[in-house]
Image (tube, rainbow, N blue to C red):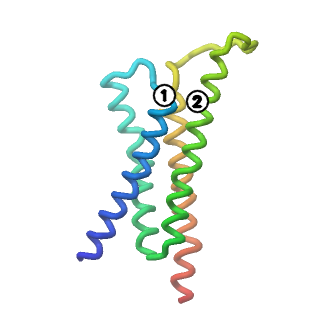
Amino acid sequence: MEKLIKTLLQAILYVLIVVGLHLILIYFLELRIEGWGAGLLEFSFKVYFVPLFLCFINSFLFIRTQRIKYHVTWFLFTTLPNSLLLLFFKGIQSSGDSEDAVVVSIELFPKYQVEMLILLPGSILVIQFILALYYLIKIRKEGKDN
């Protein structure tokens, strides 16, 4: 029972570290959703719940393997693609601010709302789903072979 609690706390810590790193990157890139309010905050909790829960489950499963290479794999596949996506969001939003822009943009949503409330949680969900499949196919097969 003590080992289970330790593993759960370690998984929570890993997820909090990843979320913290993403929030720090969001802060430094100055990615702010315009029109932020209580309704948008409630919606963001609903949107991010499933991807973060799957992130926690994967973290728990990878920690149970007790192999550092799987811990690092989970951390890198959770952090790097989404960090690059955040950098891409900043790049596409700031490219439209230049005076030499030829492309006419029609803003249907406030700045960064689609990126932060649809694309980012969707990418987290897809990446975590792929990691869950990786765990089920590769790691469980390794466990049966031993």
- Mark 1: give few (<14), some (14-19) or many (20+) Cα within 10 Å: few
Q: Which residue is mark 2?
A: 90
Is residue 146 shown above or below 73? below
Res. 34 image quadrant: top left
Q: Which residue is mark 1?
A: 30
Q: Residue at x 41, y 73 (%)?
A: 64
Res. 119 image quadrant: top right
Q: Residue at x 50, y 58 (%)?
A: 75
> In the visual, does 45 lie left or right of 125?
left
Residue 124 horizontal/vertical position (percent): 51, 47
> In the visual, does 116 lie left or right of 98?
left
Q: Specify the label residue 63 is tagged with.
A: none
Three-letter residue code for mark 1? Glu
Q: Residue at x 52, y 21 (%)?
A: 111
Q: Residue at x 35, y 38 (%)?
A: 45
Q: Nearer the viewer, residue 33 or 47?
A: 33
Three-letter residue code for mark 2? Lys
State the CA–CA distance, disc 2 to disc 1: 8 Å
Contact (CB < 8 A) between labels 2 and 1? yes
Numbered disc 2: secondary structure? helix
Numbered disc 1: secondary structure? loop
For this orientation, the residue located farthest to the right is 102
Is residue 109 shown above or below 89? above
Q: Sequence order check: which comes first, mark 2 or mark 1?
A: 1
> In the visual, does 41 lie left or right of 25?
left
Image quadrant where one finds the N terminus: bottom left
Residue 85 horizontal/vertical position (percent): 59, 40
Is residue 66 shown above or below 72? below
- Mark 2: give few (<14), some (14-19) or many (20+) Cα within 10 Å: some
